[in-house]
Image (spheres, grey):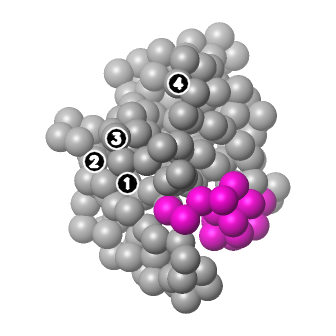
Amino acid sequence: MKIAVFAGSFDPFTLAHLDLVNRSLSLFDKVVIGIGVNSAKQGLMSYQEREDVISAIFAAEDRVEVQQFKGLTVQFCDQVRSTYLLRGLRNTNDFEFENAIAQNNLIMAPHVETFFLMAKSGLAHISSTIVRDIFQHGGDISNLVPADVSAFLYRND
């Protein structure tokens, strides 16, 4: 079984994230969305809220699982028996950053291969950082995040 881990902070989960997961389902039998926990950071959403909202988004898709994890992503891959890491690329800056991480991951865990998917046209401008900034300054994020995320954030605003 081909299991891929798509790891990130997902604070919040965006339409670009959603697109990557949906497109990756044609490549993998299962995708585990791993929400990396960094207790030193205070986010827009709690880790449990992120897990709950992302789980709701994929409630009808039994090939997507959502979990929180601490530590190295390659260690999480081993925990969930994944030999693939899924990463999204928006631009050349993302490639340089992600390539360095992928090379180091290969040293630590040669059995885990990184797959890069390019952001779909029209979604490459979306990042969680930009979405947080727009939201925190009163802007409309409904065209940047899935409806479940938008509903959650505006309900708790």
Q: How would you rate the neighbour count of disc 4 (Cα within 10 Å): few for under 14, some for 14-19, many for 20 or more?
A: few
Q: Which residue is mark 1?
A: 88
Q: Is residue 71 magenta?
A: yes
Give the magenta-colored segment's residue range.
70-84
Amino acid type, residue under disc 3 in the picture: Ser
Amino acid type, residue under disc 4 in the picture: Glu
Say whether disc 4 or disc 3 marks the residue closer to the N-terminus. Answer: 3
The answer to whether the residue labelled 4 contacts the one labelled 3, judged by CB atoms less than 8 Å apart, is no
Q: Is residue 75 magenta?
A: yes
Q: Which residue is mark 2?
A: 119
Q: Residue furthest bottom?
A: 107
Q: Secondary structure under badge 1?
A: strand
Say whether disc 1 or disc 2 marks the residue closer to the N-terminus. Answer: 1
For the residues labelled 4 and 2, the Cα–Cα distance comes to 21 Å
Q: Secondary structure under badge 4?
A: loop
Q: Quadrant of the C terminus?
A: top right
Q: Which residue is mark 3?
A: 26
Q: How would you rate the neighbour count of disc 2 (Cα within 10 Å): few for under 14, some for 14-19, many for 20 or more?
A: some
Mark number displayed over residue 61: 4
For the residues labelled 4 and 3, the Cα–Cα distance comes to 13 Å
Residue 21 located left or right of residue 53: left
For the residues labelled 2 and 3, the Cα–Cα distance comes to 16 Å
Of badges 2 and 3, nearer the viewer stands 3
